[in-house]
């Protein structure tokens, strides 16, 4: 397992109330995976945004790969860089985000010096612009802020250094503020869960085919505890609500094919590193335990096969994810009997798990 390098800085409104956090992600050296996708799938994204929208700067590749389609619309503010090309596919991706209710912000915004500049193609889709006060004179920004207001766009002041600059921006009509005057960026640890390259890519191909039976998807998901955990996190999202999950099939039916494809696009983006080693062995053991538990669902025990499989698969999650079991399970909503078996080895499903562990 590696750590995603993450820096967080709050964004404030005119009432000095925090309205979000800018999150700046960076993958470790030599890792080609997408750090935002990995943070989202691991659950650390939800933790570090602390219930407020996360301001995340997008790249062209992330937009084309639809990396931002999975998170809830109100959990995300997408910052578009000033050099983003006005390509039809990128414009379509941004337009789709806007239609879904995701807030779109043009970052480091300046009035273009030439007509037809690419940034103008995105202005109609944007809810707000963010202005870097290090590169523009606040005294000359009054016409720009006024023009933005007439178009219904919010103005965000970035790099507000001191009280004097904050008061000047407030007088100009800026809506949100960010910078050292309020809070400096803070580095945060952001442990991520291991990616599952082969399973994620295979699942993405299967899920995009409408003729693929759900049992085939379930079979591939069942081959990897990391993929299964990520699926349960999607089911646990606010949009899908959540009874306690009892099996992989149950989770798959709740999430639906469209959300499966969105989730897998993220999962495949996270898994572009070849560092496996110990994780491979733990995953192999977890799958072996799952099949063993499943075989103990006999007419005599009257226990559900799918539930026993899930318990066996998750029984090594604390080792796979390098964190206490209760912290892992707090990120997903499982049936109470499943949690009892995994946390305390109690309840109706604990017997088969104890047998497997003893063996």
Image (cartoon, grey):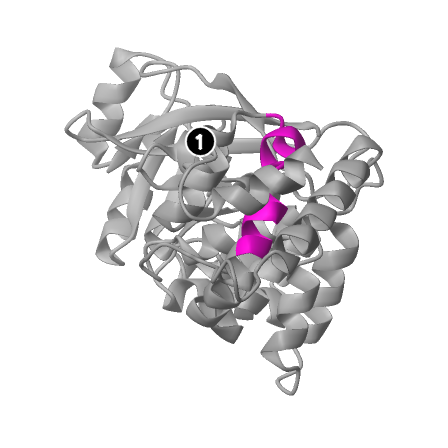
Residue most extreme to the front: 300
**Snapshot quadrant of residue 162:** top left
Looking at the image, which residue is at 24% across and 46% down?
A: 146
Q: Dot 1 corresponds to which residue?
A: 344
Please state the horizontal and vertical placement of residue 306, each as a whole percent of the image: 54, 62
Please state the horizontal and vertical placement of residue 244, each as a whole percent of the image: 36, 54
Looking at the image, which residue is at 71% across and 37% down?
A: 359
Please state the horizontal and vertical placement of residue 303, each as a whole percent of the image: 48, 59
Query: Looking at the image, which is closer to me, 355 or 207?
Result: 355
The span shown in magenta is: 308-322
Mark 1 surroundings within 10 Å by alpha-carbon count, few (fewer than 14), some (14 through 19), many (20 or more): few
Please state the horizontal and vertical placement of residue 116, each as a whole percent of the image: 55, 64
Residue most extreme to the bottom: 211
Compared with residue 92, is residue 192 higher up or lower down, i.e. above or below? Answer: above
Q: Is residue 279 covered in magenta?
A: no
Compared with residue 174, is residue 162 higher up or lower down, i.e. above or below? Answer: above
Q: Main secondary structure of the magenta part?
A: helix
**Snapshot quadrant of residue 4:** top right
């Amino acid at each position: 397992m590696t750590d995603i390098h993450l820096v967080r800085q709050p964004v404030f409104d005119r009432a000095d109330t925090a309205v979000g956090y800018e999150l700046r992600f960076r993958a470790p050296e030599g890792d080609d995976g997408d750090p935002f996708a990995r943070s989202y799938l691991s659950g650390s994204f939800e933790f570090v945004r602390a219930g407020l929208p996360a301001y995340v700067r997008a790249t062209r590749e992330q937009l084309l790969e639809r990396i931002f389609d999975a998170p809830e619309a109100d959990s995300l503010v997408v910052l578009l860089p000033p050099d983003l090309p006005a390509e039809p596919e990128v414009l379509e991706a941004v337009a789709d985000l806007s239609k879904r209710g995701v807030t779109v912000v043009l970052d480091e915004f300046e009035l273009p010096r030439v007509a037809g500049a690419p940034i103008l193609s995105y202005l109609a889709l944007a809810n707000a612009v963010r202005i870097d006060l290090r590169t523009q004179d606040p005294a000359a920004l009054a016409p720009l802020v006024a023009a933005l207001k007439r178009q219904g766009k919010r103005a965000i002041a970035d790099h507000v250094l001191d009280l004097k600059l904050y008061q000047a921006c407030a007088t100009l009509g800026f809506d949100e503020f960010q910078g050292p005057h309020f809070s400096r960026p803070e580095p945060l640890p952001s442990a991520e869960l291991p990616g599952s390259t082969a399973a994620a890519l295979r699942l993405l191909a299967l899920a995009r085919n409408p003729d693929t039976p759900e049992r085939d998807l379930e079979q591939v998901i069942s081959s990897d505890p990391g993929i299964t955990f990520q699926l349960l996190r999607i089911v646990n999202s606010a949009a899908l609500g959540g009874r306690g999950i009892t099996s992989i099939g149950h989770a798959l039916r709740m999430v639906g094919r469209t959300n499966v494809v969105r989730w897998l696009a993220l999962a495949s983006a996270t898994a572009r590193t070849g560092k496996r080693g110990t994780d491979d062995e733990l995953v192999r053991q977890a799958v072996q335990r799952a099949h063993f538990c499943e075989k103990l669902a006999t007419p005599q025990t009257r226990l559900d096969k799918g539930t026993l499989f899930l318990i066996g698969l998750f029984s090594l999650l604390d080792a796979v994810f390098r964190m206490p079991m209760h912290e892992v399970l707090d990120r997903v909503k499982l049936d109470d009997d499943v949690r009892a078996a995994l946390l305390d080895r109690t309840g109706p499903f604990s017997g088969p798990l104890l047998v497997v562990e003893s063996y």
